[in-house]
Structures are given as C-alpha cells and as structure tokens.
Image (tube, rainbow, N blue to C red):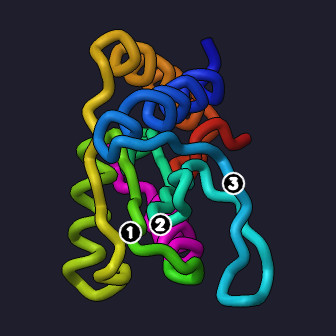
Amino acid sequence: MSSTLVLIECKKWIIESWLPKKYGMSFKKQKLTMQGRGIFEFEAVSTDKQIICKISAETAVAGRRIMASGKKTKLRADCLMLALASAEKKLLILTETSMHDLALREQTAGRLPLDIKITLVRLPADLKQKLAAALDEESLGVRKSGNSDSFGAV
C-alpha cells in the first residue's frame, strides 16, 4: 500500500475515532476564514468550530535516520495556519514520536506558538504497523533518489 493511502487512513482514524472519543463531538474537514482574509481547509474541525486540528502521521527523520529539515518547515507552516484561525483550541496532532519530540523542542525554543497544543496520538497496532512499513518503504526510495528532505521526492 502506498504511503499516501496509509497516511490518509491514519488521519481518517484520528478524525472519525480518536477525536470524537477524546472531545465528545464529531469532527470533519472544513474550510475556515483566516483572520478575515483568505480561506484554509483544516483536516479536522469540531462541530462547534471551537477545536481545529492539523494532523501529521509523518516521521521527523528521513533517509539514513537524519533529521529532515523540510519537516521543520512543514511544522512551522502547519502552526502558522493554526495561528491564523480563530478557535478556542488549536491542536497539532502527531502520530510519530520523532515528530512530536521535534515539535516540542521547536515550541520550547520559541519557534512555534505556545497557544497550539502539540498532541501525540497513539495509533492502533494495525495502523501503526502499516504506517511504519509505508514510511520504511518511502525512506528506502528517498535513499535511492539521494533526496533526504522529503519522502517520495525524485
């Protein structure tokens, strides 16, 4: 199974199972106005629009287990979108420990907003295995292509 399909499956489980169980309401993909200008589609918005989420099921390392600099850029971009939207709770949901650790270090260093709650979600065992296999497969492709900054790039 391609990594894209596995990532979609992981996000779907978070949106349809984990978030409703945690917050007692449903969530769906939704476009929101950003500080009166522009529109952005968030992966998960609560029915009352008070909780907004960006979700990442990717790892912070690539290739030969080196830190992927493009991942920091993605974290910052995701947090920028959260920061520009109005909501009571802004969640950056991560499924990989390496990405969660990176996000917390960036937030502690002042490079991510403090009002964004960085959350590590534990995937069910079957999804975790699929994700690990897909990311390993992508990592192998990155090593072969020589690009250690983003998965699947050629």
Residue 94 percent location from the top left of the image: 36, 48
The answer to whether residue 78 is left or right of residue 120 is right
* 54 magenta-colored: no
Q: Label 2 is placed on what type of residue?
A: Gln
Name the residue rendered at 29%, 41% in the picture. 22
| Residue 37 position (above or below residue 132) | below
Residue ID for mark 2:
50
Q: Distance between the residues labelled 3 and 2?
A: 12 Å
* Amino acid at the residue labelled 1: Lys
* Of the pair 148 and 41, the residue shown nearer to us: 41
Please state which of the two labelled residues, at mark 1 or mark 2, is closer to the viewer.
2
Q: What is the number of the mark on residue 89?
A: 1
Residue 140 seen by the camera? no
Using the numbered discs, state the Cα–Cα distance from disc 1 to disc 2 in whole angstroms.
6 Å
- Relative placement, left or right, of 85 versus 132 is right
Q: How many marks?
A: 3
Do the numbered discs 1 and 2 sit on residues whose CB atoms are within 8 Å?
Answer: yes
Which of the labelled discs sits on residue 78, or is there none? none
Q: Which of marks 3 and 2 is nearer the N terminus?
A: 3
**Residue at left offset 50%, top offset 61%:** 52
Q: Which of 6 and 145 is in front in this view?
A: 6
Chief secondary structure of the magenta portion: helix
What residue is at 48 percent from the left and 57 percent from the top? 53
Query: SS for tag 3?
Result: strand
Region in magenta: 65-82
Q: Are marks 3 and 2 in contact (CB under 8 Å)?
A: no
Which dot marks residue 30? 3
